[in-house]
């Protein structure tokens, strides 16, 4: 679980097996036949990763939807997305100080791309290469 404080208000975030259900129950999209269907959380994650890779900036709405889903996972009494978003201060839109976005990105990486998260940790660990046996040792 992670905690983000935005203008003095604590938001507790987590991700577990219920997160995709909370997400899909809240967000509807039109399918190829024009019918409204529940959006799969992976569609949001794909949109975030694609935008991050191509433009360097993740889509704010998808990031906020994931933020909401992670908060709802920790606190099931969190209100619906629109009500919840209306309570957020304008400062959440400032990309240069969006600590919450970094936390959401970290949770996405850890939960949906665990091999990438573990390889990042291994690559930055002090002395990680020193522990590997050398040839002829």
Image (cartoon, grey):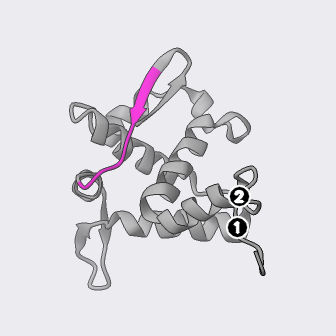
The secondary element bearing badge 2 is classed as loop
**Image quarter in which the N terminus is found:** top left
Instruction: Please identify the quarter of the rendering in which residue 56 is found.
Output: bottom right
Q: Nearer the viewer, residue 115 or 73?
A: 115
The residue under label 2 is 128
Residue ranking furthest to the top:
8
Horizontal side, residue 131 vs residue 87: left or right:
right
Residue 102: say if magenta.
Answer: no
- Residue positioned 23% across, 52% down in the render: 18
- Residue positioned 60% across, 71% down in the render: 50
- Residue positioned 48% across, 56% down in the render: 110
Task: Give coordinates of residue 85: x percent, y percent.
Answer: 42, 35
Q: Which mark is residue 47?
A: none
Crowding at mark 1 (Cα within 10 Å: few <14, some 14-19, many 20+): few
Task: Give coordinates of residue 10: x percent, y percent.
Answer: 45, 21
Crowding at mark 2 (Cα within 10 Å: few <14, some 14-19, many 20+): few
2 or 1: mark nearer the eye: 1
- Residue positioned 64% across, 59% down in the render: 122
Residue ranking furthest to the front:
137
* 116 up-or-down from 128: above or below: below
Task: Give coordinates of residue 116: x percent, y percent.
Answer: 57, 66
Instruction: Please identify the quarter of the rendering in which residue 83 is found.
Output: top left
Do labels 2 and 1 touch, CB within 8 Å? yes
**Image quarter in which the C terminus is found:** bottom right
Q: What is the CA distance from the residue labelled 2 to the residue labelled 1?
A: 7 Å
**Magenta stretch in the rendered image:** 10-17
């Amino acid at each position: 679980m992670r905690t983000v404080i935005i203008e003095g208000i604590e938001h507790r975030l987590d991700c577990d097996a219920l997160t995709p259900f909370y997400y899909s129950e809240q967000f509807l999209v039109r399918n190829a036949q024009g019918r409204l269907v529940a959006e799969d959380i992976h569609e949001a994650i794909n949109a975030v990763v694609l935008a991050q890779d191509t433009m360097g900036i993740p889509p704010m709405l998808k990031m906020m939807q994931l933020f909401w889903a992670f908060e709802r996972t920790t606190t099931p009494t969190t209100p619906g997305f629109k009500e919840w978003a209306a309570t957020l201060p304008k400062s959440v839109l400032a990309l240069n100080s969006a600590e919450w976005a970094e936390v959401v990105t970290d949770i996405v990486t850890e939960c949906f791309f665990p091999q990438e998260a573990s390889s990042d940790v291994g690559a930055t660990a002090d002395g990680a290469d020193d522990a590997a046996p050398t040839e002829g040792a």
